[in-house]
């Protein structure tokens, strides 16, 4: 217990893991961020997850600069090829290069994941902070959260996408319209957990001395929230952010997989997997690349979330 | 406890009404038109007649109330009639599907057995695998068994079911040819051979879902066991000379099961609705597949009714989980 001096030594983690012998002398880290990073590094899975995720993101962002094949280019003579040097992942039934398509699909899937996560985080944090901070709004907002939690999410998402795809496609163009629709549908049906966690933390924070002190000198609510409350609930928000990317990517690919995602000529990982299913008897390897990509991203993000949760929990940190 | 249950039951009525209104509104605002896909040669006045015959003539609030009445009064009466051979609901309007023009609940009753056998079996197997794995992982924390269990659990809930399903199809039905990749609902189990066929076609979808469910539940089981293993009463039990077997299986296990039972209860609605993807992968024509075809076919009454049934199940099992928690743990009292 060298760092996190504010915490008593007997505070064990919620997992009840037997604490290793205390009293190892370590140099106290320079800042809280350094302490978090040190704890994060000690979680092997999290470090591997971070490396894999960073590698995939770099490949998806900069891969198309290196692998300059057009993902939409149809070369009907070269269709249904296995892996060759010209096409490392092979080609599909129209002769389009699968490596280029997986890279292009990754951009869309990641963009959907990150944007939907940001939306759900914004809504969740807003509802959580407002419900926790303003007692009068607590009841109604939490009933609303319960209502959303009782909604059958996947059926509703399917209905939303099926029925609202065309009008939005008319308004924003086919790709952008679907993007807006899917991102907002996922974002608006996944904010409830964040809101609940943030509300709980805000309720505890509100009774702390520094908040009372700040209120006693007349700090208005708005500044109170931005200066004192929000920075202190950042750690659960960061953890939900990480896990939110993973669940948004899974939901998007599930929608695409059911044929209710992006238009057919617009590759996303779920869509590529869905298209490959029809050829599974003859070219079973074609489902592997998009499937592996989805699984790797989700797995690495989940491991990162795990490590981040441990690292941001001051009761575990520094043991 | 009884007053708590009653209060929660009463409270769930406005929740359900709100949900039904949300579902109805979404479908109402949706621009899809059930007669839009009919041939253009139908003259406009006939088209209007068709719309009216589908029950679309009345304004929104009237149709909403009629649907609520049909859902909560007529359909239960019909079920009662079918069970007891009585005649309470004679002549009253049931909820009809736009696609097949037959009562929605009859179609649901046809599809329910497939979903229950495949998905329900998968959930059961998932729980049966998860509990022992959770116990051993917690008892031998950080052992190789625990490490492998953690890895598999992480894989189980990170890899989406549509990929595990496809992967199993590639390996076991394309390469090895052991199991069929398509679930045949017309199979009648009446002999040993057809039973074996049924088992073979159920293996892959059940394996996919069981892995997914076991991954989540085994994590809960492990965390809950770990919480209890370090409690004072465990030390007391050991100190007074209890055998290790008794300590783990009687003292710790019974206390650890409390949160796990509620988690298992919370997962039950997913058995009905959450397996949409797996049913689609293996072409099981259960409820999930029914929902997908209804959505594609613009079959509004079917979509409404199915989605609302899923919502009822979620609310109901939330309540069941809360009540179970109170019943199993005498320290928790809702008063």
Image: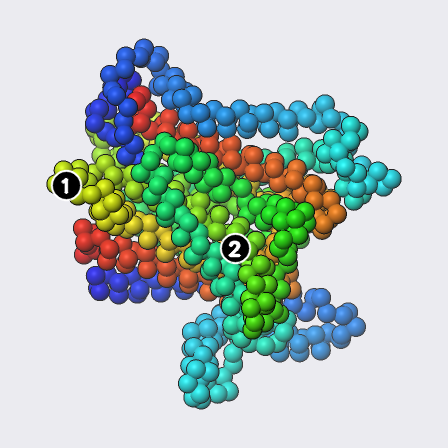
Using the image as rendered, state which of residue A210 and residue B256 is in the foreground. B256
Q: Is residue B48 above or below residue A99?
A: below
| Residue indicated by mark 1 | B241
Q: Are marks 1 and 2 on the same chain?
A: yes
Foreground mark, 1 or 2, reads 1
Q: Quadrant of residue B153?
A: top left
Residue drawn at (80%, 29%), measured in percent from left and top? Answer: A86
Q: Please identify the quadrant where the C terminus of chain A is shown.
A: top left
Q: Are marks 1 and 2 in contact (CB under 8 Å)?
A: no
Using the image as rendered, state which of residue B74 and residue A142 is in the foreground. B74
- Residue A8 relative to residue B50: left or right: left
Residue B335 x, y percent position in the rendering: 18, 56
Using the image as rendered, state which of residue B125 and residue A262 is in the foreground. B125
- SS class, disc 1: loop
* Distance from Cα at disc 1 to Cα at disc 2: 43 Å
Q: Quadrant of residue A63?
A: top right
Please rate how many residues cluster around mark 1, counting C-alpha atoms within 10 Å: few if below 14, some from 14 to 19, many from 20: few
Q: Is residue B66 above or below residue A233?
A: below
Residue B194 x, y percent position in the rendering: 59, 68
Which label belongs to residue B206?
Answer: 2
- Residue A316 relative to residue A98: left or right: left
Q: Is residue A315 above or below residue B303?
A: above
Which chain does the residue under circle 2 lie in? B
- SS class, disc 2: helix
Q: Quadrant of residue B79?
A: bottom left
**Residue B232 visible from this viewpoint:** no
**Residue A107 visible from this viewpoint:** yes
Residue B197 x, y percent position in the rendering: 59, 63
Q: Please identify the quadrant where the N terminus of chain A is shown.
A: top left
- Residue A309 relative to residue A250: left or right: left
Residue drawn at (42%, 62%), measured in percent from left and top? Answer: B313
């Amino acid at each position: 217990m060298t760092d996190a001096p504010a915490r008593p030594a007997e505070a064990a983690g919620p997992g009840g893991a037997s604490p290793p012998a205390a009293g190892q002398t370590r140099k106290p880290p320079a800042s809280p961020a350094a302490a978090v990073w040190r704890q994060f590094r000690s979680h092997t899975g999290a470090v591997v997850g971070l490396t894999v995720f960073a590698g995939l993101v770099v490949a998806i962002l900069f891969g198309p600069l290196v692998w300059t094949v057009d993902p939409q280019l149809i070369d009907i003579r070269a269709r249904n090829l296995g892996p060759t040097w010209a096409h490392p992942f092979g080609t599909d039934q129209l002769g389009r290069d699968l490596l280029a398509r997986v890279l292009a699909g990754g951009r869309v899937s990641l963009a959907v994941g990150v944007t939907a996560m940001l939306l759900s985080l914004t809504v969740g944090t807003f509802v959580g902070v407002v419900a926790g901070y303003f007692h009068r709004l607590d009841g109604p907002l939490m009933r609303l959260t319960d209502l959303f939690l009782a909604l059958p999410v996947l059926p509703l998402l399917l209905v939303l996408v099926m029925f609202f795809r065309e009008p939005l496609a008319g308004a924003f163009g086919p790709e952008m319209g679907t993007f807006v629709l899917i991102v907002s549908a996922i974002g608006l049906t996944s904010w409830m957990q964040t809101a609940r966690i943030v509300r709980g933390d805000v309720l505890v924070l509100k009774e702390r001395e520094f908040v009372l002190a700040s209120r006693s000198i007349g700090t208005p609510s708005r500044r109170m929230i931005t200066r004192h409350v929000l920075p202190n609930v950042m750690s659960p928000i960061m953890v939900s952010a990480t896990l939110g990317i993973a669940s948004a990517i899974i939901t998007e690919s599930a929608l695409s997989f059911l044929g209710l995602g992006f238009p057919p000529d617009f590759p996303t990982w779920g869509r590529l997997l869905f298209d490959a299913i029809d050829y599974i008897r003859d070219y079973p390897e074609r489902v592997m690349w998009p499937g592996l990509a989805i699984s790797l991203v989700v797995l690495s993000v989940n491991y990162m979330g795990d490590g981040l949760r441990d690292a941001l929990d001051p009761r575990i940190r520094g043991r | 406890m009884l007053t708590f249950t009653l209060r929660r039951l009463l409270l769930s009525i406005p929740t359900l009404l709100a949900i039904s209104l949300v579902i109805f509104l979404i479908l109402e605002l949706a621009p899809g038109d059930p007669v839009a896909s009919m041939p253009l040669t139908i003259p406009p006045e006939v088209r209007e007649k068709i719309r009216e015959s589908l029950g679309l003539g009345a304004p929104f609030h009237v149709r909403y109330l009629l649907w609520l009445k049909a859902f909560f009064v007529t359909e239960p009466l019909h079920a009662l009639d079918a069970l007891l051979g009585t005649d309470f609901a004679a002549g009253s309007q049931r909820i009809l599907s736009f696609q097949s023009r037959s009562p929605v609940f009859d179609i649901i009753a046809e599809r329910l057995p497939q979903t229950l056998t495949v998905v329900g079996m998968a959930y059961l197997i998932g729980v049966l695998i998860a509990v022992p794995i959770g116990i051993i992982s917690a008892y031998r924390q950080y052992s190789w068994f625990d490490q492998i269990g953690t890895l598999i659990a992480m894989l189980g809930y990170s890899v989406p079911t549509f990929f595990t399903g496809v992967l199993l199809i590639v390996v076991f039905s394309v390469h090895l040819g052991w199991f069929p990749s398509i679930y045949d609902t017309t199979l009648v189990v009446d002999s040993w051979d057809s039973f074996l066929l049924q088992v073979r076609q159920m293996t892959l979808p059940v394996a996919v879902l069981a892995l997914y469910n076991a991954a989540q539940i085994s994590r809960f089981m492990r965390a809950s066991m770990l919480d209890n293993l370090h409690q004072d009463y465990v030390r007391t039990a050991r100190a007074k000379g209890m055998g290790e077997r008794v300590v783990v299986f009687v003292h710790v296990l019974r206390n650890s099961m409390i949160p796990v039972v509620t988690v298992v209860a919370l997962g039950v609605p997913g058995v009905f609705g959450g397996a949409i993807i797996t049913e689609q992968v293996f072409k099981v024509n259960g409820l999930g597949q029914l929902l997908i075809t209804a959505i594609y076919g613009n079959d509004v009454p079917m979509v409404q009714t199915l989605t609302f049934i899923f919502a009822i199940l979620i609310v109901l099992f939330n309540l069941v989980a809360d009540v179970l928690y109170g019943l199993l743990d005498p320290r928790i009292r809702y008063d």
